């Protein structure tokens, strides 16, 4: 759920976590902890795993941070674009050299590349963030539509990660109804997240180059922190209930 260059989240954690991470448990047989959206099906919640680990956090935040710092410092578009793209490419090279999964880093390069091309061709620094804004529009609209169509996307994602069916959508029993209600509320959390980003960032984008520093800061502040918060709240709603302890046996009368 990220544009890959604005710090919205570590390189689309919904489907870009490293390939060797386990699903559905929180720790797989190879000892690698699940990350990103995969933490929703874990027995406990780890903040560092939710944001993709320290490396995932750096790869997500650094390109956008460099763009803002360089642009605000020198007020030149080209150096800022070069610094941002270089950071994303270095992340891929390092992963290739270490023979670690590159999916997350490649996702970051894609997002950064789109932003760089958009800003370079238009000559307007704020367009570096245009792709991210459109991504948030798409996610907000998609999540809202999934609720209206009674296919709340959180429920779909969790069911797929757990390798479960979608019987909760049409079930009439109290268990299905409760699960359906929790999935809807969890999806509303993400509608609110993307909507909040748009409410803050779109007006800054429309102010043009004078607000680029504020726009970049807003994207960083509303990126990983809000993503982690939304993921934690979602996990609280959808986590599997703990097994109830067996009732203690009453002693028999002699």
Image (cartoon, rainbow, N blue to C red):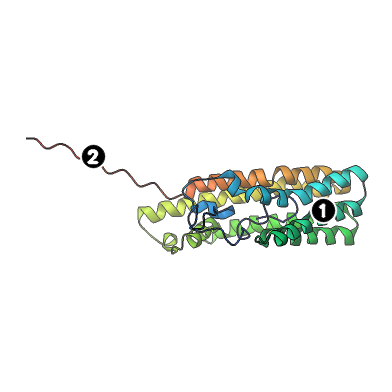
Query: Which numbered circle lies on residue 155?
Result: none
Relative side of 139 to 87, left or right: left
Residue depicted at 65% across the width and 60% down the height: 100
Residue depicted at 48% across the width and 58% down the height: 29
Q: Nearer the viewer, residue 54 or 134?
A: 54
Task: Provide the residue designation for mark 1.
Answer: 84
- In the picture as drawn, the residue positioned furthest to the front comes out as 98
Split into 4 quadrants, where in the image is the C terminus? top left
Q: Position of residue 58 (x, y in %)?
A: 71, 48
Q: Position of residue 10 (x, y in %)?
A: 67, 52
Q: Residues within 10 Å of mark 1 (few under 14, many from 20)?
A: many
Split into 4 quadrants, where in the image is the N terminus? bottom right
Task: Provide the residue designation for mark 2.
Answer: 248
SS at badge 1: helix
**Marks 1 and 2, the one that precedes in the sequence:** 1
Q: Nearer the viewer, residue 146 or 113?
A: 113
Q: Nearer the viewer, residue 127 or 140?
A: 127
Q: Position of residue 35 (x, y in %)?
A: 58, 53
């Amino acid at each position: 759920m990220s544009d890959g260059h604005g710090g919205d989240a570590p390189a689309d954690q919904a489907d870009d976590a490293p390939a060797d991470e386990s699903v559905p448990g929180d720790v797989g047989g190879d000892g690698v902890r699940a990350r990103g959206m995969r933490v929703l099906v874990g027995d406990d919640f780890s903040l560092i795993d939710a944001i993709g680990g320290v490396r995932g956090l750096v790869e997500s935040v650094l390109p956008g941070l460099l763009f803002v710092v360089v642009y605000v410092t020198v007020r030149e578009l080209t150096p800022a674009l070069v610094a941002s793209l270089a950071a994303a490419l270095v992340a891929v090279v390092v992963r290739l050299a270490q023979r670690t999964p590159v999916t997350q880093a490649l996702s970051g390069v894609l997002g950064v590349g789109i932003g760089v091309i958009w800003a370079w061709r238009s000559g307007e620094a704020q367009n570096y963030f245009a792709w991210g804004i459109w991504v948030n529009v798409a996610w907000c609209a998609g999540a809202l539509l999934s609720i209206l169509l009674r296919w709340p996307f959180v429920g779909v994602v969790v069911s797929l990660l757990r390798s479960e069916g979608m019987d909760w959508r049409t079930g009439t029993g109290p268990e299905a109804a409760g699960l359906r209600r929790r999935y809807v509320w969890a999806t509303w959390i993400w509608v609110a997240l993307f909507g909040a980003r748009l409410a803050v960032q779109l007006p800054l984008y429309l102010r043009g180059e004078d607000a680029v520093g504020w726009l970049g800061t807003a994207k960083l502040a509303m990126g990983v922190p809000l993503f982690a918060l939304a993921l934690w709240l979602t996990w609280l709603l959808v986590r599997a209930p703990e097994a109830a302890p067996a009732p203690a046996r009453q002693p028999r009368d002699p």
